[in-house]
Image (cartoon, rainbow, N blue to C red):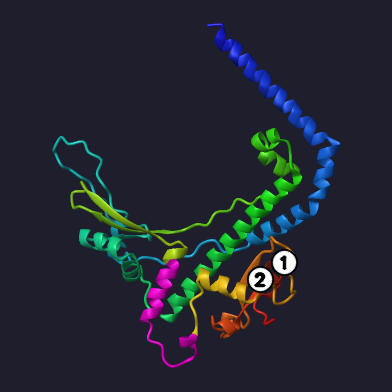
Amino acid sequence: MVIIPLVLTIYILYRLIRYIRKERYFKSEHFLEQKQKVSNMVREYNEISEYVKTMPREHDFVADNTQFSNSHLAKFENKSKYNMKRDKNKKSLHDKHVHQASLQVVRRASEEPIKYLCKYFNIGANENNLNTLQELSENIYRLNNAIDNLNKRQRKIEDDFNPPKFIRKHYRDELMKRLEVDIPDLNVEYVDYVFEYVSAGGNSSQTTTITLDEPVIEETMKYISDRIKYKKSAKAQRSLMTKKFREKIKQRDRYTCQNCKVSTKDQDLLLLEVDHIIPVSKGGLSTEDNLQTLCWKCNRTKSDKIL
C-alpha cells in the first residue's frame, strides 16, 4: 500500500516543478522580447475581437401556438387510480419554437423540412420574410467569417511566438492572457424548430427537429423566392445572398477592399466582408452591381453611407 502515496508524491512533485518552470518562463527576458514582437498581431486580433462582439447574435421566426395560448389558466391533474409508475411525455405548450402536430405532420416534416418549416412557423412567401432571412443569413455569415479569422490569427500568434512545448500543452490559455489576447466567448446560436407529437395519454412522443443553420436558411430563402410572384421589376433581377454568392463577389473584386484598396496579398489574414453599395434601407438590391468587397474596418465605419 506504500505504492499509492509514492505515486501521489511523484505527481505532486512533477506539478510543482512544472509550475516553477512556467513562472520562470513568463518572467524571462525571452518571453518579454517575444511578446513585444507579436504586439501588433495581438492588437489587430483584439480590434477584430471587439468588432465581433457588436455583431447581432440571434433572430428567429415564432410559431403560431394560439391554440394553447390560454392553457396557463387551467390546472391539469391526473386522478387515475391505476397503480402505474411511468414518466409521462408532456407537451411543450408555451415554447415558441415547438409546434404541436399530428403524427403525420411530424413525419412529413422530416421528409419535406423546408416546406413544413415555412408552413407551420409562419414563414410566408413574401418580401418581408425573404428580407429577414437575408439579414439573418448575412449576420451568421459575418459572425462565422470573423470567428474563423480570429482562430487563424490566434494560431499565427502562437506559431510566431513559438513557446516551449510544455507551455503550449499545459498553459495555452494562460499564454494568451499573458500576451493580452482578448479571446471572446463566441458561438453562433442556431435556433431549433421542433414538430412535436405527444399521444393523448402521454405515453408516446415523436419529434422532428430542424436547425436554422446556414444551409437551412439558404434553402428556405430559395423556397420562398421561388414562390414569390415577381412583377417585371428590378426586384426580379436580384440574387439571393448565399455563402457561395458572397465568395463570388470577393473573387470578382480580387479579395481587395474597394474603399482603402488593401488586399489579401498585403495581409493574408485580412477580414473581408461583402456589403451593399446602396444600402437595403435606402432601396438598394442584392444584385452584383450593387455589391462590393470591403475590409472590416471600412465596412464598420460605412454604416448606411454610400461609399
User: Of 178 and 248, which appears nearest the observer?
Assistant: 248
Magenta stretch: residue 145 in it?
Answer: no
What's drawn in magenta, residue-wise?
217-237
Residue 223: mark = none
Measured from the top left, where is residue 286 in percent x and y? 54, 80
Name the residue at 21% across, 61% down.
104
Looking at the image, is 159 positioned above or below residue 211? Answer: above
If the image is split into quadrants, where does the C terminus sit? bottom right
Q: Nearer the viewer, residue 249 or 221?
A: 249
The residue that appears at 38% across and 80% down in the rendered structure is: 226
Residue lying at 60% horizontally and 63% vertically, measured from the top left? 55
Q: Which of the two residues, 143 or 272, is positioned nearer the viewer here?
A: 272
Residue at 44% x, 64% y is 215
Q: Which residue is mark 1?
A: 265
Q: Main secondary structure of the magenta part?
A: helix
Q: Which mark is residue 255?
A: 2
